[in-house]
Amino acid sequence: MEKGTAGENPTRINKYASACAIVASMISIIFGYDTGVMSGAMIFVKKEFKISDAKTEVLAGILNLCALVGSLSAGRTSDYIGRRYTIVIASVIFLCGSVLMGYGPSYAVLLVGRCIAGVGVGFALMIAPVYSAEISSPSTRGFLSSLPEVGISIGILLGYLSNYIFSGLPLRLGWRIMLGIAAIPSLLLAIGILKMPESPRWLIMKGHLGEAKEIMHKVSNDPEEAEFRLREIKKVIGIDENCDVDIVKIPDSVKSQGEGVWKELLLKPTKSLRWILIAGIGIHFFEHATGIEAVILYSHKIFDKAGVHDHKHQILATVGVGLTKLTFILLSTLLIDRVGRRKLLLTSLSGMVVTLTGLGIFLTLAEHSGGKLIWALVLSIITTYGVVMFFNIGLGPVTWVYTAEIFPLKFRGLGVGIGVAVNRLMNATVSMSFLSISAAITTGGAFFMFAGISVIALIFFYFFLPETKGKSLEEMEALFTCSKNVSKEVEI
């Protein structure tokens, strides 16, 4: 809860702010759907176009490589035109990609569609959590900022269900419907988001105090809370806290624009800003370096290695992955503002180390037995669900909440954009190399590797990431003032 906020009820969630965050999170549902549906669609694409494993990896990973362009562009775009219109751009780009994928007369056209959709994904992953964080109060920011990750989980589950429902259609029709149907919600979101307000923090950064004040009163629980939040933002921007005019001129040195912001963040950062950048990039790096994309995207391959060879049964088993992901992401949203980001992260990584190691052991036994060890098959499936469970109780949602809240307002668009770019790069690296790595060191060996990386991630999070629960966005830079202060903050 923001310090000194009179009258704020820390347990009360503002309905208007929640509605804004939910609508913004719709773009994440569309992205999640694409991730989930591609897991099953690849089976049928491979059959129709008779492509190799290498081309399958490219098809899976090209979306995330193109998302690099989207995420880096989105940060600057959102600083120039606003958070709301950036979501519109993301929706339109994804709509175009979905239509092209649904058409997909050849492997090359399908790749182009995936790449266009990837740019939209980059925009979406950067802007949805930032928008949600900027309209939220500290007491509910964790919950509202994690809604985009909930959206991804819902989308993945819908994608798996789509695989199961449309898998019975003729080969040339089934996977095209699976991929192309995402164009419909993209169009609806592009229209619907125009009804939502702009981020009040972005408006203040541009000098539109009157409009920001009107929106802030809507997303706050009472007038006292709204006025306190407005004063805090004004102070950080460099505006007189008592200034009450509708429009004020903001000095260029304060605005989030131009090469100066890049240089200040990347080349000449202050100690606190450097620490924030390391934390933001590090958490995004480890989110996918620990192997979750291999489980989500190639779950049908994992189940095949474990001994489940029927395509229909494989797809049905992946639905269980989607249900597990959604169940525990919802649990995490209820805990994140009560337990805190740091404890959820450490619990999550500890569980992932155990379950990834177990998955490596049981898959190795199942492969060597040729699928004859039923108990190894069952335990392989259970530990697969276990990896998904522990990832989504902490690392999955906290990554997006944490990076959306730690960067100062001036650097938020750029900083989150860089973090998302790293996230997509690691996602692409895992999705485009998992089959090759599995062929080289076995599928079980690949998960032993991910378990080792998870140990490194656990150490990094323990020493580098302080708790941010209950802090206002304007307090974050002070939290990271220097390494000495951060080390004190992270003590449990």
Image (cartoon, rainbow, N blue to C red):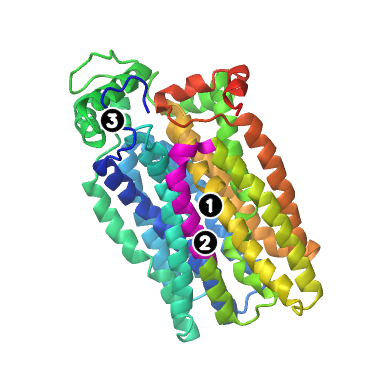
Q: Which mark is residue 324?
A: 2
Secondary structure category for the residue under label 3: helix
**Magenta region includes residue 330:** yes
In the displayed structure, 285 sits above or below 358; it is: above
Horizontally, residue 479 falls left or right of residue 135, namely: right
Task: From the viewer's side, name the closer residue of 378 and 235.
Answer: 378
Task: From the viewer's side, name the closer residue of 108 and 289.
Answer: 289
Q: Amino acid at mark 3?
A: Leu
Instruction: Please give the range of residues in magenta.
Output: 321-341
Task: From the viewer's side, name the closer residue of 111 and 189.
Answer: 189
Residue 326 in the image: x percent, y percent? Answer: 47, 58
- On-image quarter of the N terminus: top left
**Magenta region includes residue 181:** no
Badge 2 or badge 1: first in the primary sequence: 2
Residue hosting label 1: 392
Q: Which mark is residue 203?
A: 3
Mark 2–mark 1 contact, CB under 8 Å? yes
Q: Residue at x 40, y 59 (%)?
A: 30
- On-image quarter of the C terminus: top right
Q: Residue at x 71, y 46 (%)?
A: 453
Q: Amino acid at mark 1?
A: Asn
Task: From the viewer's side, name the closer residue of 245 and 356.
Answer: 356
Compute the Cα span from label 3 to label 1. 33 Å
Q: Quadrant of residue 12?
A: top left
Secondary structure category for the residue under label 1: helix
